[in-house]
Image (cartoon, helix red, strand yellow):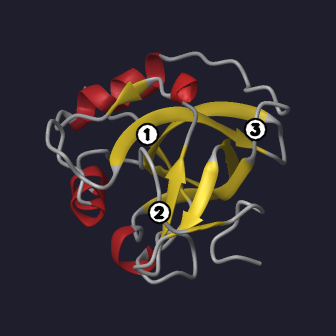
Amino acid sequence: MRLMRLNVFVYGTLKRGQSNHERFCRDLVSAQEATVRGQLYELPYGFPALIVPKADVIATGTTDYLADTETEHRIEIEPPEKSLGPTVHGELFTFDDPEEPLPALDELEGFRPGEKSLYERVLIPVTLPKTGVTVPAWAYVVQSASGIYLPGGHWPAL
């Protein structure tokens, strides 16, 4: 069975140059600037949280990492309309093997399918500004945030 590549949208401590990048993203195949629709908050803990429109959530992550990646590759999505809300800036990371990074990322983000946790791993549309292409990718989001709203959609704030 051929392993499919895994796409993950990151917007905080996993981005290049941030505190968790080297530890969790060293097997990265590629990294590209990317955007999603949503709102970004600086939490009191020193890291950000992303809220995305419920309509943009295509699927919720499970502990079956291969099935999650297959879902990602089965989905064909339309680019979201730009006028429908604020934009969050981050990076699209591509990995060769979903079974290596996803468990580690789920652990870092405290995501446990079926249990209450701060972050949830969801499949959402991610746009690559350089090409205008939109692809499905996994991202860690929250349902609501208490913290400082970052209206520019960048963390750390510019």
> Residue at (73%, 25%) from the top-left corner?
79
Residue 98 placement (x, y as % from top left): 31, 44
> What amino acid is at disc 2?
Ser
Secondary structure beneath disc 2? loop
Q: Please identify the quarter of the rendering in which residue 40 is found.
A: bottom right
* Residue at point 83%, 40% (across, down): 131
Mark 3, residue position: 85
Instruction: State how far apart marks 3 and 1 are (Cα).
Output: 29 Å
**Would residue 57 appear left or right of 24 to someone viewing this image?**
right
Q: Position of residue 21 (x, y in %)?
A: 45, 75
For image coordinates 64% across by 44% down, the residue present is 38
Q: How far, Cα to Cα, is label 1 from label 2?
A: 34 Å
Residue 133 shows in the view: yes
Total residue callouts: 3
Vertical position of residue 94 compared to residue 136: above or below: below
Residue density around tag 1, few if under 14, some if 14–19, many if 20 or more, within 10 Å: some
Residue 146's label in the rendered image is 2
User: Residue 156 at what x, y percent from top left?
Assistant: 64, 77
